[in-house]
Amino acid sequence: MRLIDPSDSPQDLAAAFLSSVLLVYSAASAIAILRVRRLCRRRLHDLVNPLWLVRLLLPLFASIWSIAELLRLPILRRRLPRPLQRHPDLLCDAHLIASQALAEPAFLTVLLFLIRASIRPKPASSIAAFGAAFAAALLSALPFLVLHAFYLSISTWDWRQLRFLSNLFGITSGDIHSASSPAKKSSRCSHPLFGTVLLAALAAVYIPVFVSASWGVVSLVINRRLRARLYVLCATVVGSLSVQVATLAISTLWSTQDPVFQWLSLAAVAAVMTMATSGQVILVVRPIIDALALGDVAAAPLGERRSTCMVRVQDVEQQPPSSAVRGSTRAR
């Protein structure tokens, strides 16, 4: 079987590439955190514990979203076992539940948890912090899971043929195929307006809360680099959510086979990937690198500032150790 089929559109290939890159990057981020934890246990415990375990939730939910997005694309569904190929509607349902109902709300909740935790007293242990963050993520996703499950159940009722409900749930006669129809095997998953409305409601509530929390942290941060990262993270989250909601809403005006729909879907994928990647870079990778570097800079003499964990510290050597540690502590 060829890796690329002639029927695969460029938009699907690009979306599969972006999702795969995010999946690989998320796995690499999680492995890097665990490796640093093992090699530099004492230093990581003193500087970034107990939030290091909470940071692992960001790669976890980003990976779930990436896998769900791959399930949406025909490029992957054609390479699945035949029993699954006969029921692509189940894969579309799994994509909707895993991405919009679970992974994305949970990822955004963990982002907000880390931002707020950076200016609050640290929990007693990493297990307590992880439990609180994981519980908050699941609780935030629970309403979306229930509503999407309700949507998937009523979308097969007879009264779905009513015009208003068909538009609301994104169901058209062209989207319904028999189990043996070849068109069903190559059809693309649609973006129901119902799910887009829920995502828009999430963005409307989340964006003001996230901006307010980010502004509270920025007001306490002394280090200009940390402030710049928070500005970038805030702008990325707001922009990505806005682009995703707009593109998914507009895509409901076209059929799944239309190139416009495919370009809009690709734009939504790129927006989520940008948000997930930025969140992991700013709240997972950089805090650990900075903590390790600043710890060595503060502890070592002026002429012998090197990191025992192989972290470059050129960016922080120009700052007095006391102010650098104070700025980093306030940022976290």
Image (tube, rainbow, N blue to C red):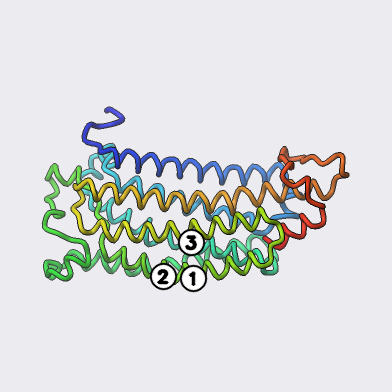
Q: Amino acid at mark 1?
A: Pro
Q: Which residue is mark 2?
A: 204
| Residues at circles 1 and 3 in contact by the CB criterion of under 8 Å | no
Asked if disc 2 and disc 3 are in contact, CB closer than 8 Å, the reply is no
Q: Tell me how many marks there are.
A: 3
Please give the label number shown on residue 144.
none
Residue at horizontal 50 percent and vertical 49 percent from the top: 277
Decide which of 96, 287 is in the foreground and name it.
Answer: 287
Q: Amino acid at mark 2?
A: Ala
Callout 3 secondary element:
helix
Q: CA distance from mark 2 to mark 3?
A: 13 Å
Q: Which residue is mark 1?
A: 208
Tell me the crowding category of disc 1: few under 14, some 14 to 19, or many 20 or more residues within 10 angstroms, Cα based.
few
Quadrant where the C terminus lies? Answer: bottom right
Where does residue 324 sit, x and y in percent of width and height? 77, 54
Q: Quadrant of the N terminus?
A: top left
Percent across and percent down for residue 251 are 25, 56
- Residue, disc 3: 108
| Residues marked 1 and 2 touching at CB (< 8 Å) | yes
Q: Position of residue 287 (x, y in %)?
A: 65, 52
Secondary structure, mark 1, is: helix
Name which residue type carries label 3: Leu
Location of residue 229 by image quarter: bottom right
| Residue 83 found in image quarter | top left
Look at 57% across and 69% down and name the residue there.
Answer: 213
The kind of secondary structure element at disc 2 is helix
Question: Residue at left 21%, top 35%?
Answer: 7
Ranked by sequence position, the earlier of labels 1 and 3 is 3
Mark nearer the N terminus (2 vs 3):
3
322, above or below 117, in the image: above
Does residue 224 sit above or below 194 in this rendering?
above
Q: Nearer the viewer, mark 2 or mark 3?
A: 2
